[in-house]
Amino acid sequence: MYSLETLSGFDFELSSHCNAKCPQCPRYDIFGNLQKDLNVVHLDANIIKKLPIQKMKNLKTVNLCGNFGDPLMHPELNEVLTFFQNQQISISTNASLRSKEWWSNLGRNRNIDVMFCIDGIGTEHELYRRNTSYNKVLENAKAFIESGGNARWQFIVFRHNEHQINEAKKLSEDMGFKEIKFIYSDRFDTDNKWKVYGKNIKINFDSGETTFDLQDTNMVDNNYLYDLEKSSHQTTLRESLNAPEGQKYWKTLNQKKGKISCVCSIERKLYIHSDGTVYPCCMLASVQLGKKIEKLMLKRLVRDYKKIDLHHNNLYDILESDVFKKTLPDSFNGDPFQHPVCIEWCNKNTGKAYFNNKAVLDIH
């Protein structure tokens, strides 16, 4: 399934710390509170330094991304970047952190590109990327691009920002982004709306107008604020499967599934979580929280997480462990069972990786 010599890429979650409060992020519960069992931690930089890069002859790409945090939160990010001099580094970030000077210096690195996650123009951006500043993000992007940085823009299309697609295209060209990519959220699993809760509701009792102060931290938490809605142009996987609204689509998905073909193992990529555990992909690593059946089933497969933890084993031993050599490959074929996340993403009939229901269009 994997070997050091054939690895082509890493996805790192450098940190599970984050400054943003995006409503559909798995680090929060439905009321916007931090998940109680989230291990909020920075990936130990020494773990990265100990990776046997010299043996990875085919290692071409390093992506700094994550399920629960933003890579710019890591206090030793600059040092991490210098460790991968011979690889192309891609950073995915909400980009509302760090100074203009830092961004300008980053843009001088020829082996680094940045995906700026900007989900709308002006305040529309802040309806999803809560606790970030749209103006600060553009200021940082400008500094990065003007110093020669390779910048890409990812725009998640919702109902509230879909009218801004053409405006975003023009702005991306004017600012010098190399690419703008429009995608849909894949997290409208049971409904076409997602209720947003928080502290920021304000009501003008003279006009009856409701507004949202995204900087106010003194108001009562868990207020219902507004609904996120899927784009009117989007067809979700649930809708494509004709699964009942209000229910997770597992049953229908399972009935119509095809053979599981693990995309990340085919591409020889690995995901290293901020707690030092190693997975084929970020999707499997994302089920660590709460009391979900997906979490319990992964635990049943892995059994002892120390086996895949870089605090306890080196990467070679992890890749040679029964988890990577036998348990996970066997599970793709149903022995002892197929994990729901693997079915959801990598079954060849209806899996998200193959179904491709997210992309809207790419502008180069």
Image (tube, rainbow, N blue to C red):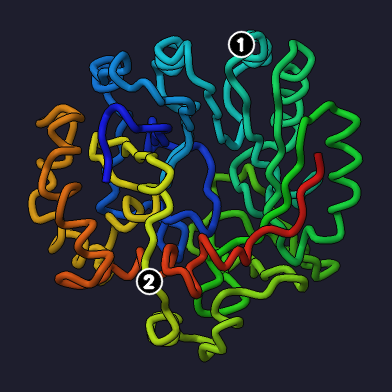
Which residue in the structure is indicated by mark 1?
109
Report the front residue among 273 and 141.
273
Q: Residue at x 41, y 75 (%)?
A: 258
Report the front residue among 163 and 125.
163
On the image, the x and y values in percent for residue 29 come to: 40, 61
Q: How many residues crowd around disc 2 within 10 Å: few (fewer than 14), some, or many (20 or more)?
A: some
* Residue type at tag 2: Lys
292 displayed left or right of 220: left
Q: Is residue 159 above or below residue 123?
A: below
Which is closer to the viewer, label 1 or label 2?
2
Secondary structure, mark 2, is loop
Which residue in the structure is indicated by mark 2?
259
Q: Residue at x 19, y 62 (%)?
A: 330
On the image, the x and y values in percent for residue 189 come to: 51, 74
Q: Residue at x 57, y 70 (%)?
A: 194
Question: Nearer the N terminus, badge 1 or badge 2?
Answer: 1
Total marks shown come to 2
Q: From this viewpoint, is residue 223 visible?
A: no
Q: Is residue 239 above or below residue 38?
A: below
358 displayed left or right of 246: right
* Residue type at tag 1: Asn
